[in-house]
Amino acid sequence: MENQNSNSKLKGIIALLAILLVGSLVYIFKLTSDAKTLENTVVTTKSEKDAVMKDLEELKATYDAAIAENTSMSDELIAERDKVEKLMAELKSAKGDVASLSKYKEQYKALEVKMKNLMEEVAVLKTKNEKLTTDLDSTKVVLEDSKKYNQVLVGQNEELAKTVEKGSKLSITNLKTGAYKLRSSGKQIETDKASRTDVLKVSFTIAENSIAKSGDKTYYIQVIDGKNNVLGDKATIAFGDKSLTYSFTSTVKYENKTVDVSEQLRGKDFAAGTYFVNVFDKGELVSKTSFTLR
């Protein structure tokens, strides 16, 4: 009887130990599973944190490139880049738990949406600037062509003005001189002797010119004897920085038609030698000739 009771107690103890052993094994298995789960969670969280950091770095790089283009939106782009940099600093020092990581993901997505909107605006602005640059270049080309054309026109006008000025000058032709002796009757006898000369005649022709300015024209006639003396009035007149001593003037009414001019220079004691006769239009010599008295 006692042996049976002892066996029963022993079986009870063994059964209890078996139950405790199974419980311990289950508890150890659960602890091991929880540890692995926690380890996997930590690894996953770190991987996601690194991914968010990488995304933020790419976001910052996009802003840096856009800011480098120096558009009119630079201030707004810089402000958004500063937000990205601030979030990167916060993420770097964060514990990396699931709750905070979820918050950073949401903030990144908001910044990403803002970035895409800004990049679209930058693209539109860039397209407009490129078109404006093209238009400005085209305008510059047109202006340069116009400038060159105007320079050609100015040159042509200057040449035309010179041609007109040159063409409008009157030509003096047929300049002739002669010495004459005056009779008491008033008749003039041509001579080549200085001792017999009482008057010198100077004649010339003003040629027809349709583009010349009509009106009174004054010519200055200079007669120089063989001793280099200016005969006649010996008056002096200045034209700019030039001066002219002349013998007499001849004023003619010119109406764009051919005009014959004849003038006389009276005198006495004419010297023998070669005489020079010059006709001036203001300060410009327009005709000259010479003759000799013996």
Image (spheres, rainbow, N blue to C red):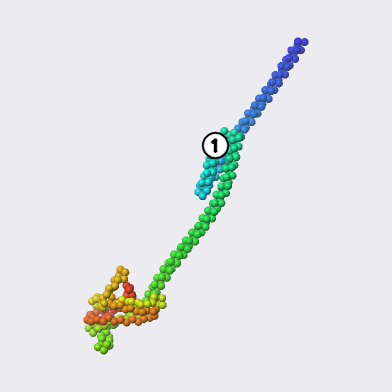
Q: Quadrant of residue 28?
A: top right
Q: Position of residue 221 (x, y in %)?
A: 30, 77
Left or right: 6 as drawn, with respect to 175: right
Q: Position of residue 264 (x, y in %)?
A: 29, 82
Q: Give me the residue at 45% from left, 67% from top.
A: 153
Q: Is residue 152 above or below residue 255?
A: above
Q: Residue furthest bottom?
A: 185
Q: Position of residue 179 (x, y in %)?
A: 27, 83
For the N terminus, the image quarter is top right
Number of numbered labels in the structure image = 1
Q: Is residue 69 above or below residue 269?
A: above
Q: Residue furthest right?
A: 1
Q: Quadrant of residue 40?
A: top right
Q: Which residue is mark 1?
A: 90
Left or right: 33 as drawn, with respect to 6: left
Left or right: 170 as drawn, with respect to 131: left
Q: Position of residue 212 (x, y in %)?
A: 39, 76
Q: Give me the residue at 56% from left, 49% from top.
A: 121
Q: Give me the residue at 33% from left, 75% from top.
A: 281
In front here: 2 or 247?
A: 247
Q: Is residue 32 above or below residue 199?
A: above
Q: Residue furthest top?
A: 2
Identified by mark 1, the residue type is Glu
Q: Quadrant of residue 57?
A: top right
For numbered disc 1, what is the local secondary structure? helix
Residue 48 in view of the camera:
no
Residue 260 in view of the camera:
yes
Q: Residues within 10 Å of mark 1 (few under 14, many from 20)?
A: few
Q: Give me the residue at 56% from left, 51% from top.
A: 124
For the C terminus, the image quarter is bottom left
In front here: 292 or 205?
A: 205
